[in-house]
């Protein structure tokens, strides 16, 4: 495939991705990660906490060319789960535990994968001998770095991708391909716009964030979703009202500040919108396993076990000054 045809295919794939509802898309190379040493240091310092799976497939995690045989290029997509005009929630009521925006709607894994599989199937019809691999948190891929290469945004100090107009409330997915697809000439790598701003670092109540690094062991999202053991009392007090996940570092980011919808390039995917932004703490504390399954039906929140959700609910209740009759460990 000559360069002109390769660029044309890249432009076509990007437009087709947007027609499927993705807010943005771009083409990335399969070059090895520039952050291999940094990731190794992060793991060696055990900043991944109990997420042992982060240690697996280190070579794959830092070299996307190894994901499939003869990998040549990657389509990367961004799916907005919230937009800048919806950055502020109403104050939480006492007795309620907050849910992070990324967990309020339908399971993003399924929604993104379904659309990417359609694109991959269409490509297979044209390139029957080629290989394609879809990823959405399902493969050891340096997603944010690929998104940066694909012109979707830059990696902020809170380590999340920030699009200069759309902000950072975005899921990342993509397709690794064994065909040559070049980025259109209009695609550029977006330079870091964080500058001297340290809003995300300053606002993190557990001091989990340092510049371009997050210590998962202190991160509220990690503590409420991944960490299954009791939580340190000092960290409990800093968790505030969060029962599942946390949005603080994104809420304070200037690039997520209010912007009139009329000038937004895209708005949030309605599939991720839900009227539920919190859980009743007393209800959660009295959930059965069937109650948990029912509450999480069709949601990505099912990752959190019943004991974890009840632990989180008790912590939030204590932070709100609610007395609970419970002698068990949190």
Image (cartoon, rainbow, N blue to C red):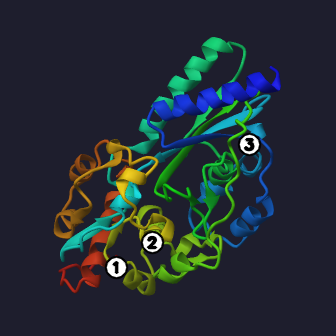
Q: Are marks 2 and 3 in contact (CB under 8 Å)?
A: no
Q: Is residue 212 left or right of residue 84?
A: right
Is residue 190 visible in this depiction of the protein? yes
* Dot 3: element: helix
Q: Position of residue 91 (x, y in %)?
A: 24, 74
How packed mark 1 is, by other alpha carbons closer than 10 Å (few <14, some 14-19, many 20 or more), is: some
Q: Is residue 325 left or right of residue 24?
A: left
Q: Position of residue 215 (x, y in %)?
A: 59, 73
Q: Mark 1 or 3 closer to N-term? A: 3
In the rendered image, the quadrant that contains the C terminus is bottom left
Q: Is residue 100 left or right of residue 115?
A: left
* Dot 1: element: loop
Quarter-wise, where is residue 69 in the image? top right
Q: Are marks 1 and 3 in contact (CB under 8 Å)?
A: no
Q: Mark 2 or 3 closer to N-term? A: 3
Q: Position of residue 251 (x, y in %)?
A: 42, 70
Q: On the image, numbered disc 2 is attached to which residue?
A: 220
Measure the C-alpha gap from mark 1 to mark 3.
38 Å
Quarter-wise, where is residue 329 in the image? bottom left
Among all residues in the image, which is located at the extreme front? 262
Q: Are marks 1 and 2 in contact (CB under 8 Å)?
A: yes
Q: Mark 1 or 2 closer to N-term? A: 2
Residue at 77% from the left image edge and 38% from the top image edge: 66
Residue at 44% from the left image edge and 36% from the top image edge: 21
How packed mark 3 is, by other alpha carbons closer than 10 Å (few <14, some 14-19, many 20 or more), is: many
Kindly identify which numbered label has been placed on residue 64. 3
In the rendered image, the quadrant that contains the N terminus is top right
Q: On the image, numbered disc 1 is attached to which residue?
A: 240
Is residue 106 visible in this depiction of the protein? no
Measure the C-alpha gap from mark 1 to mark 2.
9 Å
Q: Position of residue 257 (x, y in %)?
A: 42, 67
């Amino acid at each position: 495939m000559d360069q002109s045809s390769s660029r044309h295919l890249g432009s076509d794939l990007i437009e087709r991705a947007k027609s499927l509802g993705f807010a943005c898309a771009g083409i990335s190379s399969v070059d090895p990660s520039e952050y291999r040493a940094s990731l190794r240091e992060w793991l060696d310092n055990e900043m991944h906490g109990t997420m042992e799976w982060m240690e697996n497939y280190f070579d794959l995690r830092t070299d996307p060319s190894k994901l499939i045989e003869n990998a040549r290029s990657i389509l990367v997509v961004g799916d907005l789960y919230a937009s800048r005009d919806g950055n502020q929630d109403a104050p939480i009521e006492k007795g309620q535990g907050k849910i992070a925006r990324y967990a309020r709607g339908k399971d993003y894994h399924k929604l993104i994968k379904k659309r990417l599989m359609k694109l991959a199937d269409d490509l297979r019809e044209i390139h029957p001998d080629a290989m394609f691999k879809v990823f959405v948190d399902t493969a050891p891929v340096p997603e944010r770095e690929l998104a940066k290469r694909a012109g979707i945004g830059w990696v902020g100090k809170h380590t999340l991708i920030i699009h200069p107009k759309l902000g950072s409330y975005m899921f990342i997915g993509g397709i690794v391909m064994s065909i040559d697809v070049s980025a259109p000439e209009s695609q550029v790598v977006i330079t870091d716009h964080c500058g001297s701003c340290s809003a995300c670092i300053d606002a993190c109540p557990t001091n989990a964030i340092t510049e371009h690094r997050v210590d998962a062991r202190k991160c509220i999202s990690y503590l409420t979703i991944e960490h299954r053991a009791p939580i340190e009392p000092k960290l409990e007090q800093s968790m505030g009202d969060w029962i599942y996940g946390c949005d603080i570092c994104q809420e304070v980011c200037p690039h997520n500040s209010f912007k009139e919808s009329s000038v937004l390039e895209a708005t949030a995917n309605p599939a991720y919108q839900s009227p539920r932004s919190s859980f009743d703490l007393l209800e959660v504390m009295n959930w059965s396993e069937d109650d948990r399954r029912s509450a999480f039906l069709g949601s990505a929140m099912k990752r959190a076990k019943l004991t974890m959700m009840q632990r989180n609910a008790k912590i939030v209740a204590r932070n709100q000054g609610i007395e609970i009759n419970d002698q068990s460990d949190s």
